[in-house]
């Protein structure tokens, strides 16, 4: 008979805090365990003789310890040091078991919370743009970043890669109101870090994703209390305070732990709109640990308003234009529009324009993990979320006279042959100089409340076979999302300036009649333009097997999913509301719902399969490959009913084929990866918005197919003590292989743009950074490069490449007495060090924009910004 050896112990960090989820493995075997909530682990092995035990965990140096197995119990106390090889970091996302990145046959990137804190991110894009294969546009400000993954066509936002907190998406279904997932929550210091899993394997688990998953993992309290306060100051009026506290609830023998985190902030920038960004967020969890598992309750409350910056007129060289005061104009949102209101057939409409991107609400989630035995584990989550969400879009310079012209020229354009005019700035009785520059603007209020119910449960069974191990997981995911998409619009006349004054204009037309053209700065009240109520149900079942055989690891999985959606489209009519005879029809008439609806249901079912394998070539190199056939259910809002029960076209899934092969390399000095990939998408439904009769509408509906071939590399080279050179490089060749486009206004269908490159996606992406960290002093200098790209699928406007520089440094002080672990880090960082004014996107609502005109409509990257931080750990 073989002898059995019991191995047990405790794993802590260098400050004595237990480490949960560390991997303990006897090399060249399947014997091992994962540390529990108190850092404890135990397992039994039938191996004998001299062996090597490997201990690894996210953000810590991987350790190896020699042991001798002879039947005598082994009890270990292990202390891990921070600063591990990124390839040894434990993967928590899109997997049924804990394992290192090196042992996972897919592409994964991660950032620890300390790195994110040092970054002083302006937006989610600042965090994501360092990930290879990701194009992240953050020119709009803090929220609603546009994210593009490996050449998959998208309007931006998070279409093919959901944003998750603790393994559950912030919004389970997408396309009910087109809001980006990052409007529902903000990053804070209560996270361990963030992982981005790319590739088709991400489609299998949970909500599923065809291109990747962004997953933030929260800290949970442990037996050693921890407290963090981070204060951040930046130029242009930013002051933000984050906090985290966690520890044990109850007495010494308690098995209940808590964590509480959040922030309060106020910000006038990064571009001053005259309206502040301000708000709070609180998140918390309470974890009850028992003998065979744990139960955790997570919660969030948010009440936050973030100003959003839209494209604006630039000169022919795509540089900012000087306004009436001589300063370069960075945005055209006016603080004078706060509290704007007007009458409609349904009563007074009060615009929430001053709130920008406003989110109020939160979520409550329960997470239950239970081990029936060492080889049978249950994992489940349920989540309820409810948000009152408004998205204010102020589209500067988007009207009939959308480029800055003098007031005299403007009046000649709108009233040829007029007999005179009178114009004053709002609240000022003095006439405006006729040589002052003015411009047309459009404001859109998107009122988008959302309620989401979702849940997931899975069982994982471990089977030991003669030469390996099977980890077989079966699970299901259920979700229902209800959302509104109610829009109001109005047009504004303002001066061409930062935080511009509004213009009240009247004139005498050629027939001698008095005409009031703009009141309170508004020259077209428009009113309600969308009145949609949508809901969607999703149900999925998946079955996977993660296998370990000596040097081989295989992942296989299957998923089947059904979706059902309901579209209620409210009819809108225009009626005369104001009876002043001098008002133009645009001011007198206002649109509002008439109470009638056109309704239709859609449904679809599809399946996905993923196959992946990894081979350990030697201790330094692992080879891997993966293949997947996946699907994406398109946005329901693109299938509006044309009659009750009838949509304009059949609702069906979009199909995606992905293949990737590569190598992961890890030596003492150099860590990295190299991969080649293919992504093919078929039958994608794309909606292009544009302007028709002065209002923003769905203009074109395209049936598209695309393909992308790419090469991707990451590297981390320790070239001297405490110094490292890190970065990534991606080359991708993408093409539109099919594009049948229907003009929704003219109701005609044509073939267009086939053979062109995809909109807003470069061929080359890269990052390069030099980092120093000796535990006391840290510093970085990094560059993020986005190559040239086309503004639209027609490829008529090419946007120049952008390079964003960042510089930062910090110093850690020990405070208190000599035995104290309390620390204070003082640091700074500079975003966009060289103040590159490159354009992140052209006019996505004007697909026929030309690139050689006198004026160009686009969104520059955010300007240079300086941050100071103080981080206190105690």
Image (spheres, helix red, strand yellow):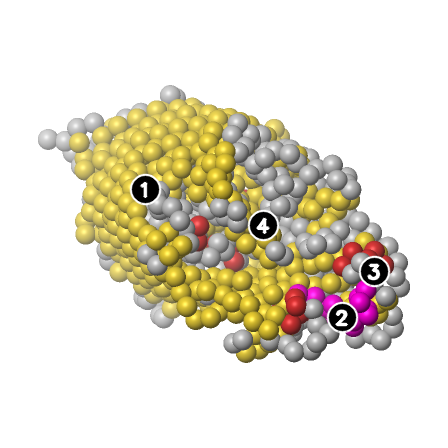
State the separation of the CA atoms marked 2 and 1: 62 Å
Disc with the residue nearer the chain's start (2 vs 1): 1
Front position in the image: 186 or 408: 408
Circle number at residue 655:
none
Residue placed under numbered mark 4 in the picture:
690
Residue placed under numbered mark 2 in the picture:
515
Instruction: Tell me the quarter of the picture where residue 826 sits.
Output: bottom right
- Of helix, strand and loop, which one carries label 1? loop
Q: Position of residue 705 (x, y in %)?
A: 44, 33
Indicate which label's residue lies in the foreground, 4 or 1: 4
Give the crowd class for mark 2: few <14, some 14-19, many >=20 residues within 10 Å.
Answer: some
Q: Is residue 162 left or right of residue 311?
A: left
Q: Position of residue 661 (x, y in %)?
A: 41, 25
Disc with the residue nearer the chain's start (1 vs 3): 1
Residue placed under numbered mark 1 in the picture:
204
Span shown in magenta: 507-524
Residue placed under numbered mark 3 in the picture:
417
Indicate which label's residue lies in the foreground, 2 or 1: 2
Q: Residue furthest front?
A: 511
């Amino acid at each position: 008979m073989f002898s059995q050896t019991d191995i047990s112990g405790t794993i802590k960090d260098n400050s004595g805090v237990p480490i949960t989820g560390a991997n303990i493995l006897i090399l060249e075997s399947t014997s091992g365990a994962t540390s529990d909530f108190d850092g404890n682990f135990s397992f039994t092995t039938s191996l004998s003789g001299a062996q090597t035990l490997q201990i690894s965990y996210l953000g810590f140096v991987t350790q190896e310890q020699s042991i001798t197995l002879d039947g005598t119990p082994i009890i270990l106390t292990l202390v891990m040091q921070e600063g591990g090889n990124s390839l040894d970091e434990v993967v928590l996302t899109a997997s049924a078991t804990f394992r290192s990145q090196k042992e996972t046959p897919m592409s994964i990137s991660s950032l620890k919370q300390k790195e994110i804190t040092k970054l002083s991110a302006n937006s989610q894009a600042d965090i994501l743009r360092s990930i290879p294969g990701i194009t992240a546009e953050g020119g709009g400000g803090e929220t609603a970043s546009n994210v593009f993954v490996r050449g998959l066509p998208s309007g931006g936002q998070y279409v093919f890669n959901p944003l998750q907190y603790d393994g559950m998406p912030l919004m389970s279904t997408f396309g009910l109101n087109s809001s980006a997932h990052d409007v529902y929550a903000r990053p804070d210091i209560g996270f361990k870090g963030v992982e981005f899993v790319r590739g088709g394997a991400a489609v299998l688990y949970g909500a599923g994703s065809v291109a990747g998953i962004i997953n933030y993992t929260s800290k949970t309290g442990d037996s050693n209390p921890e407290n963090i306060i981070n204060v951040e100051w930046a130029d242009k009026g930013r002051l933000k305070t984050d906090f985290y506290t966690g520890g044990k609830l109850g007495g010494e023998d308690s098995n209940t732990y808590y964590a509480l985190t959040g922030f309060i902030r106020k910000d006038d920038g990064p571009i001053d709109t005259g309206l502040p960004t301000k708000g709070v967020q609180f998140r918390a969890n309470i974890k009850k640990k028992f003998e065979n598992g744990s139960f955790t309750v997570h919660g969030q409350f948010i009440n936050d308003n973030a100003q959003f910056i839209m494209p604006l007129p630039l000169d022919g060289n795509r540089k900012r234009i000087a306004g009436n005061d001589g300063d370069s104009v960075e945005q055209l949102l006016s603080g004078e529009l706060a509290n704007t209101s007007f009458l409609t057939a349904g009563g007074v409409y009060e615009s929430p324009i001053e709130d920008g991107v406003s989110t109020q609400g939160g979520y409550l989630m329960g997470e239950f993990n239970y081990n029936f035995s060492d080889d049978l584990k249950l994992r489940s989550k349920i989540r309820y979320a409810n948000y009152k969400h408004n998205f204010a879009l102020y589209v500067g310079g988007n009207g009939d006279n959308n480029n800055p012209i003098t007031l005299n020229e403007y009046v000649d354009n709108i009233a040829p042959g007029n007999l005179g005019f009178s114009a004053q700035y709002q609240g000022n009785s003095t006439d405006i100089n006729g040589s002052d520059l003015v411009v047309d603007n459009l404001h859109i209020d998107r009122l988008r409340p959302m309620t989401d119910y979702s849940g997931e449960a899975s069982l994982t069974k471990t089977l030991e076979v003669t030469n390996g191990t099977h980890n077989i997981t079966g699970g299901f995911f259920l979700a229902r999302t209800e959302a509104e998409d109610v829009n109001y619009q109005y047009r504004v006349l303002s001066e061409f300036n930062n935080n511009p004054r509004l213009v009240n204009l009247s004139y005498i037309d050629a027939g001698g009649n008095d005409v009031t053209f703009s009141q309170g700065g508004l020259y077209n009240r428009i009113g309600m333009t969308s009145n949609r109520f949508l809901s969607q149900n999703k149900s999925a079942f998946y079955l996977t097997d993660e296998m370990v055989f000596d040097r081989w690891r295989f992942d296989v999985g299957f998923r089947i999913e059904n979706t059902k959606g309901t579209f209620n489209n409210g009819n809108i009519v225009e009626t005369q509301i104001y009876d002043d005879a001098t008002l133009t029809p645009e001011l007198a008439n206002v649109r509002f719902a008439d109470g009638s609806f056109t309704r239709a249901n859609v449904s679809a079912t599809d399946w996905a399969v993923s196959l992946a394998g990894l081979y350990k070539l030697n201790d330094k190199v692992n080879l891997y490959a993966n293949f997947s056939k996946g699907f994406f259910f398109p946005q329901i809002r693109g299938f509006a009913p044309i009659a009750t029960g009838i949509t304009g076209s059949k609702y069906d899934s979009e199909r995606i084929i992905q293949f990737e092969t590569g190598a992961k390399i890890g030596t003492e000095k150099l860590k990295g990866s190299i991969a080649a990939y293919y992504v093919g998408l078929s039958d994608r439904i794309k909606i292009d918005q544009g302007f028709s009769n002065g209002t923003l509408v769905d203009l074109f509906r395209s049936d598209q197919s695309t393909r992308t071939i790419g090469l991707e590399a990451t590297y981390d080279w320790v070239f001297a003590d405490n110094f490292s050179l890190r970065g990534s490089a991606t080359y991708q060749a993408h093409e539109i292989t099919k594009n049948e486009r229907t003009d929704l206004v003219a109701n005609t269908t044509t073939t267009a743009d086939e053979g062109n490159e995809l909109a807003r996606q470069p061929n080359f992406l890269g990052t390069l950074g030099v980092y120093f960290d000796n535990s006391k002093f840290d510093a970085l200098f990094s560059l993020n490069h986005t190559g040239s790209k086309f503004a639209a699928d027609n490829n008529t406007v090419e946007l120049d490449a952008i390079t964003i520089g960042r510089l930062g440094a910090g110093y850690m002080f020990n405070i208190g007495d000599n035995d104290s672990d309390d620390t204070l880090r003082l640091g700074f960082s500079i975003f966009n060090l060289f103040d590159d004014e490159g354009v992140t996107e052209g006019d996505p609502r004007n697909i026929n924009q030309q690139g050689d005109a006198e004026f160009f409509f686009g969104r520059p990257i955010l300007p240079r910004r300086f941050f100071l931080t103080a981080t206190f750990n105690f």
